[in-house]
Image (cartoon, coloured by chain):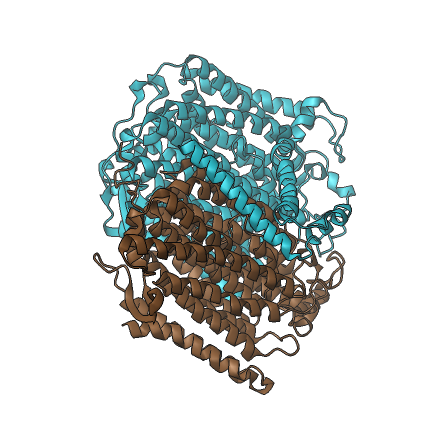
Amino acid sequence: MSPLLAAAPLPEVLPAEGVAGAAWLLVALPALGALVLFVGGRRTDRWGHLLGVATVVASFVVAAVLFAGSLALPAEERVRDLGLYEWIAVGSLNVEFGLRIDPLSLTFALLITGVGSLIHIYSVGYMSHDPNRRTFFAQLNLFVASMLVLVLGNGFVTLYLGWEGVGLASYLLIGFYTGRRSAGSAAKKAFLMNRVGDVGLALAIFLLFVELGTTQYAEVFARAGEISPGALTAITLLLLLGACGKSGQFPLQSWLPDAMEGPTPVSALIHAATMVTAGVYLIARSNPLYDLAPTGQLVVTIIGAITLVIGAIIGCAYDDIKKVLAYSTVSQIGYMMLAVGLGPVGYAAAIAHLLTHGFFKAGLFLGAGSVMHGMADETDMRRFGGLWRHMPVTFWTFTAGYLALIGFPFLSGFYSKDLIIEASLTAGPVAGWVFAVATLGAAGLTAFYMTRLMLMTFFGPERWRDLHPRRIDPADLEDPPEHYHPHESTSSMTVPMILLAIGSVGAGAFLVGGERLGHYLEASLGAPVEPYDVPAVFYVGLVPYLATALMLVGAGTAYLLVGRREVPVERPQRVSLPVRAARADLFANAINEGLIARPGIWLSRALVYLDNRGVDGVVNGTAAMLGGTSGRLRRTQTGFVRTYALTILGGSVVLVAALLTVGGLGG
Amino acid sequence: MSALLLALLLVPLIGAAVCGAMATREDLDRAGRIVGLASAAVSLVLVVVVWSQFATGPGTPRFQFALSVDWIPAFGTRFALGLDGIALTMIALLAVLVPVVLAFAWADKLPPGRTGSGFTALILATQGVLVGVFAATDVFLFYVLFEAMLIPMYFVIGRFGGPRRQYAAVKFFLYSFLGGLIMLASVIGLFVASDTRLGEGTFDWTALQGMAAQLPLSTQIWLFLGFFAAFAIKAPLVPFHTWLPDAGAEAPIAGGVILLGLLDKVGTFGFLRYTLPLFPAASQELAPLVLTLAVIGVLYGSLLAAAQTDLKRFVAYTSIAHFGFIALGIFAFSSQSLAGSALYMVNHGISTAMLFLVVGLLIRRGGTSAMTEYGGVGRVAPLLAGMFLVAGLSTIALPGTNSFISEFLVLLGAFPREPVFSVIATVGIVFAALYMLWVIQRTMTGPLRGAAVVGDGPGAASAATFGGDTGSGAGTGTGSDADESWMRRTTARFGDLTRGEVAVLAPLVALILVLGFFPGPVLEVLDPTVSATLSEVGVPDPVTPNGVPR
């Protein structure tokens, strides 16, 4: 953030040529899959899932070929634009529909199609009993296509297309079990909170248009210096609002845990590995803007720090295995957000953590899905216990993800999280300490809640032996089985879990070691800055030891509190205030409800009243007022023509009065 | 060339006359409908030809395909027609929607004593008059047609509508007619002004536009208000909107599509064609007022839409919100916002038609438009629910659908000059998501409820989109104790979309997606007219290729 760290100018954008010219296939393949499955309808039921898998795998192959092509080029030639056609052109506005092929977008494309392929394959088995499996794959393909548009678009409007596209896919997939009321509510909540963020993104685009007359990356980033400082701060803050909505960051975090209503593969792909990291992508992509806006960067780091702490705290309180993982995701994305707000010292760290997290969190979710699959869709960890004997592959792959997440030495999370903690020490004399305490403390909490999860699920007595499976939702049509029969899942599910486990173990060492990732991303994010080379609040070399120590403390505490005691099947109600607060999501929902939802409902009711009585001026109010609310809304109008004449007159009077006022003010 | 335009006007009117002649004979019902579809098909072909010949290059005249003959020489009024880009797109939209609604209405049973020919005649008459309204280049002719278009629509609502159709039809007529009368005062005022300033009284649009710069502001304001009254009622801006929910709720579905999708657009079309070019100084002076009403409309319409319990009224309120966006774009005076509004008029026509038709298909099955009588429709009629979703996403302007382009252009274009109004309206996109998703949640997803459980079946309920007694609660039940065979039985009774119904909706779905990704051809047609309008208002485009000049 100091002038010393100002990034060197990014390389010039060149037109895409050679294999890069086929980059549109990346998006077109899954989009075509979605189209065929949506339009084909039931006729495609028998083979729809296979088409879904095939398009994403093919897309992954394309991404790999492009990546290889990119590696073969010298660093300063790796940023390419593939213009496809003029999308929206009016006056001075010219929005091109095109793709940006550069190290950052290709890294994301590999993550999306790679993890996406594995999760598509997993879903073939996971969704095999679902009559709507074909719809599921259509929506999942739609998601992959939209997500690829998001990261590959070559301007902010194309990004916006993908941005809302993934929002739609996420909405559909969270609400996939349409019979459940809770799924419908969760889906709606996710879309609405995302749209709040989208308002920020839209306004940022408008401001860019005002300042520069363009919204294409190439021009915006090249001319970022022309933007007035005030506008630049506004733009960066508005982009951050968009990022908060999409990535479940404070204060828009509460939709993400609710999104666990969706099928578990969806939680793994969309709500852990890819879509929710789009906010981090947005800020990393906009690095030329943020590098010039220190206030914007500072707010990003603060939001990240707040989120990573509250996510970790709440994660300790839940008994629902998916919700613990969801809050863990909130917290881990907080880490990435903090890092990406730190500027050149943190960009590569953020992306590294994003990738490793993509592996281990997707693996953990698939593991959780495998557990649910074997446990009649139960998610309450209090009803689990001792499952390691019954599902060994799930257990071992889950363990790999668990160790990676808590930062066990030399596994993925250890490298990438350490990079972030190290970078946060350089944030300045005060902020550096605050961030150090937050990141290290949350690392300890992470070890606590994940160890608690492991102990409750896989170890201890088999509490499910004496229990009967429950109906997950009152509206479910199928009766639950009489007893739990935990079993290992089929190979189409376990193979993706194994592959992700390998990534969880090795990805960190590969990407971070030798700074492979940092150097590759240089063309997109500028030259990486080493935390060792800039002033830090204490010696950066201590971080791995401190983090490991705190990890052991957290895990040890969990062992003492959970592992050595009996876990009650019923949730204890008499708990201390902090636990109660954490269980209530630190009152986030209560605040949303009180500040937005309730006033909104009252306002809308008041307006209906006004519309029927004030504006329409109808007479029989008294009777309607005595009626119920719904009656009140409907039976209001009697059809006296004179009232309408009167209304027109009234409207005109108001209009004239307003005119006089406006005229008076103007004169 | 001008013969093509004349044909566009006459074909539907002749079709209407033929159908009208058959209207009293119930045995000619089918023949009448076929004549109607044939007429609509000819119109569509004509529009395609006109579109292909429409010039968009630099230096093209303000009006193409122009045609002018003496009408009432004593007033100097002429029967003058011509097309600019905005008029052409509206007429094209008309030509697309009329066959769709006629095809939709085909499957409906009519109220007793009414014939399909009669209904077809009214729709075609509306089409013919609307072509005239959009193509008129003589202000008096415009006024006459503006009032004339009320007549067929009055009968569409009053004879074919729901239980409160009489009430709604009278309300619709009175509101619009009163607005028209106020406009008449301004039309005459324009004539008088031209008499003193040009030496000879005229209703010719081009001559009057040339005079605009000479009119003092105070005169312009008075004349502006006359036109504004008519257009603000027609396009409904809050607080002149209350006729619309009633008219929308009581109109038969097919008529409601024409009402919401096209007839109302005459209001915003009037802003673009008449108030802005003829009263440029007044338009600038009063822009803050109109913009205030516009953003109030966006938020007010959305919040009220969210609170509705009747599906047809819900669609009407969403339209009020959309008209707010259109008015915002028009009075923000930038090339993006104006083009956005003009495109919005087309897109709103498509998306509202789609939404209203899907609601109609739902009513055809459930026999009522009360939301409380539906729930979990997606489980028994997934195709229907999918179509509702597509219509809904287009309504809330999701990127990838047609409406996104126009809403984005309006908000982006309004931002440089009117940042406060633009920001407030942008917040409206959250409200839009709220009302749409809430309705989807209440009707399409969740546990089975109401008509979806014990459907009345297509036969019993098919009169519902054409009058019939709404509100007959179809039965109760919950899905919790249901089993497989029961599900199959319900599906058979409630029924998903038929092939024919899918075919009616398919062109709209295609337009929604194609215009979402390739709006270029439409924007190209609109572009010269938008530039001309902007220069007639006399304000520079706020954003240059390098941003706002400092």
Vertical position of residue A421 compared to residue A196: above or below = above
Q: What is the letter of the brown chain?
A: B
**Residue A609 is at least partly visible in this image:** yes
Given the current orientation, which residue lies at the most extreme bottom position? B27
Q: How many marks?
A: 0
- Given residues A398 and A105, the one toward you in this image is A105
Quadrant of the image containing the N terminus of chain A: top left
Instruction: Residue A317: give x, y in percent of width and height.
Output: 65, 29
Which colour denotes chain A?
A: cyan
Instruction: Identify the image quadrant of residue B105.
Output: bottom right
Instruction: Residue A618: give x, y in percent of width and height.
Output: 67, 50
Instruction: Residue B462: give x, y in percent of width and height.
Output: 64, 72
- Given residues A655 and A131, the one toward you in this image is A655
The residue drawn where x is 43% and y is 30% is: A237
Instruction: Residue A464: give x, y in percent of width and height.
Output: 74, 41
Quadrant of the image containing the C terminus of chain A: top left
State left or right for residue A405 relative to residue B82: right
State left or right for residue B497 relative to residue A576: left
State left or right for residue A101 relative to residue A118: left
Instruction: Identify the image quadrant of residue B415.
Output: top left
